[in-house]
Image: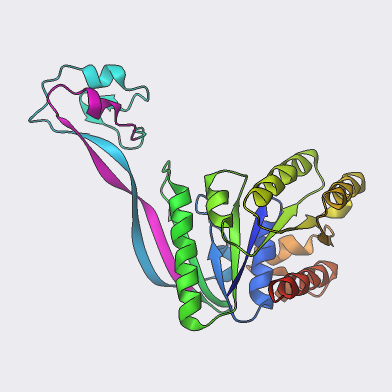
Amino acid sequence: MKEVVVLSGKGGTGKTSIVASFAALAQSKILADCDVDAADLYLLLKPELKQKNEFWSGQVAFIDKEKCTECALCQEVCRFGAIEDYVVDPVSCEGCGFCYQVCPVDAVSMKTSMSGHWFISSTKYGYLCHARLGIGEENSGKLVALVRQNAKSLAEKEGLGYIITDGPPGIGCPVISSLSGANLALLVTEPTLSGIHDLERVIGVCRHFGIPPLVCINKHDLNEDNSYQIENYCHSEGIEVAAKIPFDNVVTEAIVQGLPVVEYSDNKVTRQIEELWQIISAKLDK
């Protein structure tokens, strides 16, 4: 199977709305929501939960009251203020292990914590692999890798041709985890100064991992000068601008109705997204 990862250098560019429309347009595919810190693709796809599993990763400190001599050394060295009255706050604990190393009576131990859950669901568009990281938890890169592995295993089992991945925003560890090994990256940007800046950064990540990028300018007509600047930059870098989607309130209306915009109304936005998927599928099938 071939995998396309939809990314954006910043949040709020319309990435998830486009992925939901791809879900309605594409055949023989499986969907993966790798934005585990703020997963919201399920809001438009209305999944029926088939499988739920715990995700254990990272460590938190635990103090054994019977061994503890209350010397207070662990409280003094903890830079995160996670230990009070010789009890560890698991939310504040960063799992650095410093208290474990300095405890003179070995009363501190490091225990693996449950950081979230991962799911496999069915939708009317096909299977959806997704996850939810717990509040304040880390290791989202590991959870992203697990979601992708679930999607690949299920796609192989079902004999599906595409994996469409809704990636996280930014350029950090979760983005790297969602991007590595993919066949194509669609970068959704918007014509703002921050959008231009963050697009350049995520293009750099794609090039580092050797993933060919395509660019989609969403709401391109809100600032035509900035859109023109993005097009010039992409042209100078040899990157194709595959679509320029206009601003239209119909997208918000579709979200309110809980539908991908391509299923809500036939308009310029819908036609641009349809053409964009045709371009992506043609590149993946080469």
Instruction: Choose top left, top right, bottom left or bottom right for residue 88.
Output: top left
At horizontal 35% and vertical 37% (from top left) the residue drawn is 91
Query: Residue 271 at what x, y percent from top left?
Result: 82, 72
Q: Is residue 193 left or right of residue 170?
A: right
x and y percent of residue 157 in the render? 45, 80
Q: Residue at x 84, y 60 (%)?
A: 244
- Is-magenta flag for residue 98? yes
Q: Is residue 72 left or right of residue 253?
A: left
**From this viewpoint, which residue is outermost toward the left?**
66
Residue range in magenta is: 95-121
State the count of labels.
Answer: 0
Q: Is residue 241 left or right of residue 130?
A: right
Above or below 221: residue 226: above
Image quadrant containing the N terminus: bottom right
Residue at 14% across, 28% down: 106
Residue 162 shows in the view: yes
Quadrant, the C terminus = bottom right
Residue 188 sits in quarter: bottom right
Q: Is residue 264 visible?
A: no
Residue found at x 34% / y 32%: 96
In which quadrant of the rendered view does residue 49 lie? bottom left
**Rendered image coloring scheme:** rainbow
Q: Position of residue 102 (x, y in %)?
A: 23, 22
- Residue 105 covered by magenta stretch: yes
Q: Nearer the viewer, residue 24 or 187?
A: 187
Against 95, is 16 above or below?
below
Q: Position of residue 217 (x, y in %)?
A: 80, 55
